[in-house]
Image (tube, rainbow, N blue to C red):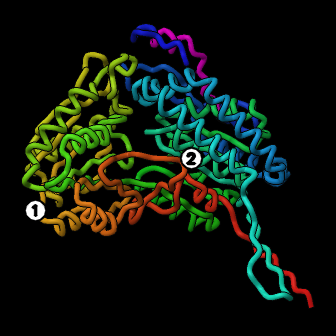
Amino acid sequence: MLDRPPTREGWIARAAALTIEGRAFIGGAYVDALDGATFARVSPIDGKVFAHVADCGEADVDRAVRAARAAFDSGVWRDADPQRKKAVLLRFASLIRENAEELALLETLDVGKVIANTLDVDVPFCANCIQYYGELADKLTDEIAPLGREDVAMVRREPLGVVGAIVPWNYPLIIAAWKIGPALVAGNSVVLKPAEQSPLASLVLGRLARQAGLPDGVLNIVPGFGEKAGKPLALHPDVDMIAFTGSTEVGKLMMVYAGSSNMKRVALECGGKSPHVVMADADLDAAAEAIAWGIYYNQGETCHAGSRVLAHASIRAALVEKIAAAQRAQIPLGHPFDREAQLGAMVDERQMQRVLGYIELGVKEGARIAHGGARALAETGGFYIEPTILDGAVNSMRIAQEEIFGPVVVIVPFETEAEAVGLANDTIYGLAAAVWTRDMNAAHRLTRAIRAGTVWVNTYDRSSLATPFGGFKQSGFGRDRSPHAIDKYMDFKTIWTSYR
């Protein structure tokens, strides 16, 4: 158990004492961008510059890809004994836990989430994911096809080669681990491109992986902006796959880049507008608590945040009051280093203004602010928004169709079960959903009818590394988590022998 400072000032002092590494990690070493360029990291906590990071471009991406390709072609990791892969990945997970405070502080400084969550959720979940895939290293098996006596066909798993992993800023460590873990256990080399808003904790992973015994060049980390570093990575002719998590708009560009370069594989986990369907017989207290956590946790900056509440008209007003009450009681907004805070800063000023713009748009469209709705803690210089409820919306409104990616929940009433299903599916997204009802027959009907990668019943945001995560429709394709995630990082080769 870490000795945690009891005050905001204690955490600020520990953050100030950090030695922050902002260089790229390529070929087993930290290096500056080839042209020496850097960019400033402004913490959303207080709006102040706290670090400078290598501003990598096409030449740096090429250097990283060449290092990854050389490592892959050498076979130093690709052909390593499964027991060795397992030992390295388990040591990697252990080192992540040993360096939890450094990682948590960097992630909080970068993206504004509260320190309690980076310590208790983001860092442990990152380590657990690496450990999970490490444990699978000696459990991946090839197949023998069922044929006649004269033929034997082996179906062998083979790694793809160089994987480009492009990850977002909302869960930098967790989602990086979702890509790194299965890609490495499959035997690939990886070039990780963290979001420009959240590179610092990811860069530490390079040091820890090398310390754990991962060979040089197998994991490379290239910070920089999407157009300058992400696009060249997606277009690179020697990258065999792009694993991307981010917006649907950019996800579509990944497909264009893959098609216009070398037909590299693409796996996408993109946006969401996930509905809670709250039936008239639902336990409103349980639903309200889960809805509040499902939209206000991590400032609503979660791809599967429950941002639409489809509420039966008979219970809508009571549910809105209970959601607001649950937020006030359990999810206070505050400085990320305050012990009691559960909702911190938006990632940057641009995102704050975007979310405030959606709130203003919602009012213009005809919705009503039932809770929150304004900027908060402006005196800190940081980027905070009150947890917000927009009531009385219609599903055709932009606030009910577009991903706001902030602490804003939209309430849409319905009258019948069939109407609820239609509203739930009336969006381009299909990442997640929830159904709230005491009638299990209705629950089964609704979960079958709703088009989403995960549908919870009388709960929300419960997860396990044992279950796959991903979406339908324009929420993407391919799955993170679970053993199923490994398959997309591998190819299957048939070796056929005839005995005649």
- Secondary structure at numbered mark 1: loop
Specify whether 33 is left or right of 3. right
Gap between marks 2 and 1, in whole Å?
40 Å
Asked if the stretch drawn in magenta spans residue 91, the answer is no
Asked if residue 399 shows in the view, the reply is no
Q: Amino acid type of disc 2?
A: Trp
Q: Is residue 364 shown above or below 7?
A: below
Position of residue 404 measured from the top left corner of the image (x, y, whole percent): 28, 46
Q: Is residue 64 shown above or below 394?
A: above
Q: Which residues are magenta?
A: 11-24
**Residue at which label 2 appears:** 178
Closer to the eye: label 2 or 1: 1
Residue at horizontal 42 percent and vertical 60 percent from the top:
471
Q: Is residue 323 shown above or below 18?
A: below
- Categorize mark 1 by other alpha carbons within 10 Å: few (<14), some (14-19), many (20+): some
Q: Amino acid type of disc 1?
A: Glu
Asked if residue 356 shows in the view, the reply is yes
- Secondary structure at numbered mark 2: helix
- Residue reaching furthest to the bottom: 500
Residue at horizontal 53 percent and vertical 37 percent from the top:
125
Q: Is residue 105 shown above or below 247?
A: above
Position of residue 168 measured from the top left corner of the image (x, y, whole percent): 47, 43
In the rendering, which numbered label is found on residue 383? Answer: none
Report the number of numbered marks.
2
**Residue at which label 1 appears:** 415
Q: In terms of depth relative to the viewer, which is nearer, 157 or 132?
A: 132
Which tag, 2 or 1, sits closer to the chain's start?
2
Specify whether 462 is left or right of 384. right
Residue at horizontal 63 percent and vertical 30 percent from the top:
96
